Amino acid sequence: MEKPSRREFVLGATAAAAAPLVGGAVNARAKGPARKLGVAICGLGNLSEHQIAPALQKTEHCRLSGLITDSPEKARQWQSKYGIPAANVFSYDTMDRLAHNKDIDIIYIVTPNAQHADQTLKAAKAGKHVICEKPMEVSVEKCQQMIDACKAAKVKLAVAYRCRFEPNNLECSRIVRDRELGQLRYLDAAFGINIGAPGQWRLKRELSGGGALVDVGIYALQATRYLTGEEPVMVSAIETKTDPVKFAEVDETMTWQARFPSGVLATCMASYNLPTVTRFRGIAERGWFELDPAFLYDGNHGRRSDGKEIAQPSGDQFAAEMDDFASCILEERQSIISGEEGMRDVRIMAAIYESARTGRAVTL
């Protein structure tokens, strides 16, 4: 048999992402893990409080068992709310002690981007599996350090790409894979928000590594990759600023085009200074499909040119990604949102920044 092409391989992997929501979840329930894997959340900010911790109450294979924070006040509040024992509370500087805690299996890192590598290396050294919020880190070199450390420690590493488990995004990937509307020809994707007050860490390059592109633009970038099942071979980008004071250190708005091996052209936008826009549209030989909204925590839906609706319940995407990661650990298999997957996005985003800086297209 001939080896599958890169496109066929990635499309197959995208299809496999549906497993945790369909057959995979059924199989995992049938096997019945001996215990739920304990998760310690590293960084107790807004996302952890309002999304990740509540999602852990819904998972089949995980449970909230630990906290990592430099805020004693937050630690006490979370301990009271979730019944976390003092022995399972750590600071960023005491993560080495995790090695002696058998109640914690996974560290979920939810801190500023430039801290991900340091905390991943500490978690790996302590023998803990890691799932880290996107973007994976601020450079390809840092990403590689994370991958190498986890491999050396024989622990798993994943990046929190929740949309890879969102039913409507999966359905759009299926439409492309099955060529229901013919061969895909063109994509456009956008994610824009109003970032809010100045002074936050996301507007400081040293902590974030970038602005709108690395924070919300990564969703549009991911969508072009999982919809095409390919890696871009060229990018060309333009950055614009309407508020050079507020966005002095990071990009306010970034637009880019990407060309894929099959000939698909993608046009994307990310912004920190717009009313919320979160959508994508794919145009194929015989019609189009779209999600609008596409990347929200809930309520994503869309339609097709043939009149069919794309409107499945989004479910809890954080719970789905964590259950899948737990299943990967229990079944000793590779995650579809592995460290290597996270590093690919960081490499492409670095090329987008280079193109915007130089005014030239960058070949990948």
Image (tube, rainbow, N blue to C red):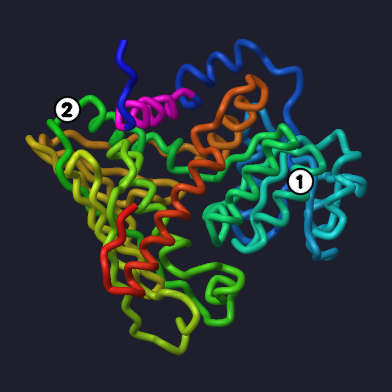
Q: Nearer the viewer, residue 88 or 266?
A: 266
Left/right of residue 79 with respect to residue 241 in the rendered view: right
Residue under label 1: 123
**Amino acid at circle 2:** Glu
Residue extending farthest left: 286
Q: Earlier in the sequence, mark 2 or mark 1?
A: 1
* Position of residue 80 in the picture relative to residue 146 (left or right): right
What is the magenta segment's predominant secondary structure?
helix
Q: Position of residue 133 (x, y in %)?
A: 58, 51
Give the crowd class for mark 2: few <14, some 14-19, many >=20 residues within 10 Å. Answer: some
Quarter-wise, where is residue 251 in the image? Answer: bottom left
Judge whether 249 appears above or below 267 on screen: below
- Identify which residue is drawn at 44% across, 51% down: 345
**Which residue is at 34% across, 84% downward?**
242
Q: Which stretch is magenta?
A: 7-19
**Residue 204, how many percent across, how many down?**
57, 76
290 to the left or right of 329: left
Residue at the spot x=42%, y=67% of the render? 212
Which amino acid does the dot numbered 1 rest on? Ala
Q: Is residue 14 magenta?
A: yes
Per the image, the residue denoted by label 2 is: 180
Q: Which mark is residue 135?
A: none
